[in-house]
Image (spheres, grey):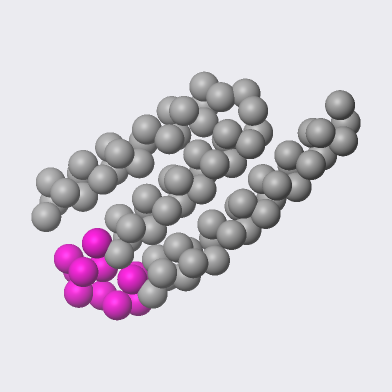
Amino acid sequence: MIVVLLLMLIAAALPLIQSIRSESIWERMLCYTSISTRFALILILYSRVQHDPMIGLVAVVVLSVGNSGLLLLANLFKAMETECE
């Protein structure tokens, strides 16, 4: 199970590298949304390993609420970019 968690952490680092390389705010926000989703799934798996339902509850809240806020913010930034051009 620890090997799976380590592989998931490595997979979560890939969008982080892409967000550093990207210059577009839209792509960066999508990368951060992907990172948020991946870390929420890692937390759910970790809560199952540790038999702690509170960690899993926090992960479910992050998974359901956190991504929508980031996507709304990304749409706001995209609208601001098109308005300024």
Question: From the viewer's perspective, is 43 left or right of 5?
Answer: right
The magenta region covers 45-56
- Magenta stretch prevailing secondary structure: helix
Residue 69 coordinates in the image, percent (x, y): 62, 58
For the C terminus, which image quadrant?
A: top right
Tell me which residue sits at (45%, 46%) in the image: 34
In this view, the residue in front, 50 or 4, is 4
- Residue 65 on the magenta span: no
Residue 1 coordinates in the image, percent (x, y): 11, 55
Residue 33 coordinates in the image, percent (x, y): 51, 48
Tally of numbered discs: 0
Q: Is residue 28 above or below residue 23?
A: below
* Residue lying furthest right: 84
Tell me which residue sits at (40%, 66%) in the image: 59
Q: Is residue 45 above or below residue 29?
A: below
Q: Quadrant of residue 26?
A: top right
Tell me which residue sits at (52%, 22%) in the image: 21
Tell me which residue sits at (44%, 34%) in the image: 16
Residue 58 coordinates in the image, percent (x, y): 42, 70
Question: From the viewer's perspective, is 38 left or right of 23?
Answer: left
Q: Is residue 78 above or below residue 64?
A: above
- Residue 53 on the magenta span: yes
